[in-house]
Image (cartoon, grey):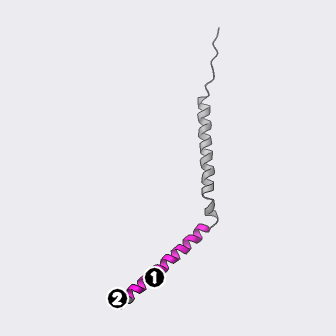
Amino acid sequence: MAEVEEKDNTWIIVGACIAGIILLVVMLKQDETKHLQSGAVAEQQKETFSKIEKRHTSNNSSAESISGK
């Protein structure tokens, strides 16, 4: 009598898991970068840098007035 060999599906399962993980990472990455497309980050950065520059210039002028220049 011939023995019936069972199919080994290990590599199919491993491949499906890898494909699922790659798909999940791509979906999460798209969701993570969604806020960059709205332009809100650029607007916030522009506002922050203008405040930093304003503070920097006000610190310089107060230092000059203290030293009497």
Residue appearing at x 63%, y 23% in the figure:
7
Which residue in the rendered view is the most extreme toward the left?
Answer: 67
Q: Is residue 68 left or right of residue 56?
A: left
Q: Main secondary structure of the magenta part?
A: helix
Q: Quadrant of residue 8?
A: top right
Q: Is residue 30 above or below residue 10?
A: below
Label 1 packing within 10 angstroms: few (<14), some (14-19), many (20+): few
Residue type at the position of mark 1: Thr
Which residue is label 2 attached to?
67
Q: Residue at the far top: name it.
A: 1
Q: Mark 2 belongs to which amino acid?
A: Ser
Q: CA distance from mark 2 to mark 1?
A: 16 Å
Q: Check disc 2 and report its element: helix, strand or loop.
A: helix
Is 54 located above or below residue 30 in the figure? below
**Residue 18 within the magenta-colored segment of the rendering:** no
x then y, percent, for residue 67: 34, 88
Residue 20, image x, y percentages: 62, 41
Residue holding disc 1: 57
Q: Which residues are magenta?
A: 40-64
Question: Where, quadrant-wise, is the C terminus in this rendering?
Answer: bottom left
Left of 53 or right of it: where is 44? right
Identity of the residue drawn at 62% across and 28% down: 9
> Hey, which quadrant is residue 64 in on the image?
bottom left
Name the residue at 60% across, 44% down: 22
Q: Position of residue 41 (x, y in %)?
A: 58, 67
Does the magenta-highlighted stretch encompass residue 62?
Answer: yes
